[in-house]
Image (cartoon, grey):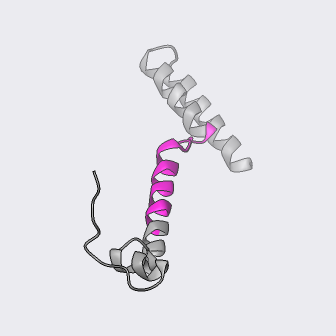
Amino acid sequence: MLVSCPVQPTGSHEETLMMLGWTMGLEGWLWMGAWIFALAVLVWFLVREPHHRSGRDEALDTLRARFARGEMSSDEFEAARRLLLMREITR
């Protein structure tokens, strides 16, 4: 099936494409670059590694969990907590 062009070309090939809307121009390239950048940032946010907490926070969480389970007394908990805090200060 042949489709006729509603616009009769009168100039060069580039002018004909411009009239038919087949070229992007600078504005089109800028918008395309902005969308590509936005998609790249979105992908980066989705696949990046989450930030890990410090070792001291994890150690305190473990200490609190052991105390909550009754594996240590309050004196042992306080002594271990002070030791962890002192090690953090001396670093």
Q: Nearer the viewer, residue 3 or 41?
A: 3
- Quadrant of res 21: bottom left
- Quadrant of res 85: top right
Q: Residue at x 40, y 78 (%)?
A: 16
Q: Nearer the viewer, residue 20 or 73?
A: 20
Q: Is residue 1 magenta?
A: no
- Residue 63 percent location from the top left of the image: 54, 26
Give the residues in magenta: 34-55
- Residue 1 percent location from the top left of the image: 27, 50
Q: Nearer the viewer, residue 9 or 17?
A: 9
- Residue 15 percent location from the top left of the image: 43, 83
* Position of 10 relative to 4 (above/below): below
Q: Residue at x 51, y 55 (%)?
A: 40
Furthest toward the front, the residue is 2
Furthest toward the right, the residue is 91
Q: Residue at x 61, y 38 (%)?
A: 56
* Position of 49 relative to 15 (above/below): above
Q: Is residue 3 left or right of residue 26?
A: left
